Amino acid sequence: MLNLKFLKVKGIPVLFWSSPKALTLKPPFTSFFFLIIGLAIFGLGEALLIAAGYGVSPWTVFAQGLTTITGWSIGFATFATSISVLILWVPLRQTPGIGTISNAIIIALVLEYILPYLPRFELEVLQVSQAVLGVIVTGFGGAIYLISNLGPGPRDGLMTGLQRLTNLPIASVRASLEISVVIIGWSLGGTVGLGTVLFALGIGPAVSASLFALNYAFEV
């Protein structure tokens, strides 16, 4: 029988690369190193999804929807969304850190310099496979950098804050959040593709499974 214990994960495990403090300007080297590695892998996953050409991530759909009603550029709409999400951190008592800033910088750099070199397939089965791989890789990278405990990115911080508030499993919280964003973005005029649906439904379980696997492998 398939073991689905990973879907019940409700928190971020503390492992050997976890920083004792999220809000610090002098993080342990190991914590910062794994933060960078995790964010780079996260960015690679996002790039794989884009390269698959099968639909963008839910938050990009939301940003596209904003552009249709405001006339903003997609870049500014994404920035405005991030700021709005950070404001939501206040009632959730989330603490920003180096990881919060690094999230935007490193993922942007990975997309800028890695995306042009990723393969673009014409066969639909390969496109779908690449999109699925993108979701899995994004979830794995997200788990690594969240465990670093140096501050999550705006959207991941919203996820962890809502999880603490509701005490629901991370997979359920993340999936509900992504699906809600897709619905709102699509209603505003954003474009939804199969890759968007795969990401919305799969990123929660991908993050949860990665947290479960890393905790099982490295728990001390």
Image (tube, rainbow, N blue to C red):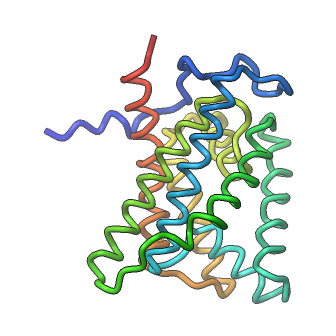
Q: From the top left corner, tell me how far across and down residue 40 is, in percent.
A: 59, 49
Q: From the top left corner, tell me how far across and down residue 54 is, in percent.
A: 44, 79
Question: The N terminus appears in which quarter of the rendering?
Answer: top left
Q: From the top left corner, tell me how far across and down residue 152 is, in percent.
A: 70, 41
Which residue shows up at 81% across the image and 50% down it? Answer: 88
Q: Is residue 99 left or right of residue 13?
A: right
| Residue 200 seen anywhere in this rendered image of the structure | yes
Which residue shows up at 45% across the image and 41% down it? Answer: 208
| Residue 93 seen anywhere in this rendered image of the structure | no
Q: Is residue 113 left or right of residue 73?
A: left
Q: Is residue 137 above or below residue 191?
A: above
Which residue shows up at 72% across the image and 20% down it? Answer: 28
Question: The C terminus appears in which quarter of the rendering?
Answer: top left
Q: From the top left corner, tell me how far across and down residue 99 is, in percent.
A: 73, 39
Q: Nearer the viewer, residue 39 or 171?
A: 39
Q: How many marks?
A: 0
Q: Is residue 48 above or below residue 24?
A: below
Q: Looking at this view, name the residue that lies furthest to the top.
A: 220
Which residue shows up at 58% across the image and 30% down it? Answer: 147
Q: Is residue 94 above or below residue 108?
A: above
Q: Is residue 57 left or right of residue 66?
A: left
Q: Is residue 170 above or below residue 186?
A: above
Q: Nearer the viewer, residue 78 or 41?
A: 41
Image quadrant assignment for residue 94: top right
